Image (cartoon, grey):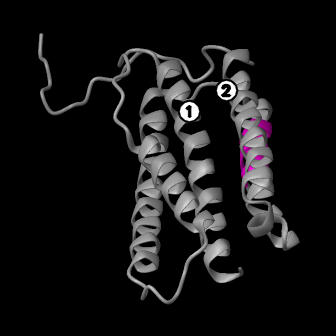
Amino acid sequence: MHISVNKPIQPKTSAHEVSKPCIFTVYFLIGIIPWVIFWFFAKTRFSILLFYNNLFYIPAIVGIVIIAANLITWLYCSTYEDYLTEVKTIGFVERNASRVVLAASVVFLAGQALPKEIELPHAFTYYSVFALMSSVLALVLIWMPSKKAHWLTMLRHIKTISFSYAISFFIAALMSWLLV
């Protein structure tokens, strides 16, 4: 019997192992609920800064649209991909999240480096920190069993929701700095 050392082991997970898994749909729905609650809180906490200009509804809407688009896409296809495709997709989410970490860090540090005479709105600091926290959460390494693609699908959905939050918070930070 000949065993090849150079050939990667392919986990035995079918691309169509389960159809319409409800638990992943719940992740996206749960992702929308805190988002709506957060923006309700932001409306009361930063009422002058956020809702002085109707443009500040954009980050809230962007977050809901991104999560809803992912939910609709998931409902449309609703099957697991093979293990290697899931690994590549998670890598894609993490690469983009790392770019948001870099961009949010640069914008936050640039805002903090401004002379004291130029006062930034508090919302800028909050949204920059929220963007950093959400994008770092999308980068957190979490161990998943290597034989089942559905575990990676779950991780991908969680990271996608966190990444969606990061994008919207980053937009809100930029808007609070540039438009107020």
Circle 1 residues within 10 Å: few <14, some 14–19, many ≥20: some
Say if 130 sits above or below 50 in the image: above
Toward the viewer: 25 or 84?
25
Q: Is residue 64 left or right of residue 95?
A: right
Report which quarter residue 52 is drawn in.
bottom right
Is 18 inside the magenta-drawn segment?
no
Q: Is residue 3 left or right of residue 67?
A: left
Task: Measure the alpha-carbon separation of dots 1 and 2.
Answer: 7 Å
Q: Main secondary structure of the magenta part?
A: helix
Spot occupied by residue 96 in the image (x, y as percentages of width and height)? 47, 57
**Residue under the image location 34 percent in, 34 percent down:** 141
Spot occupied by residue 106 in the image (x, y as percentages of width and height)? 40, 73
Residue under label 1: 158
The span picked out in magenta is 63-73
Say if 127 sits above or below 135 in the image: below
**Residue type, label 2:** Tyr
**Residue under the image location 59 percent in, 33 percent down:** 157
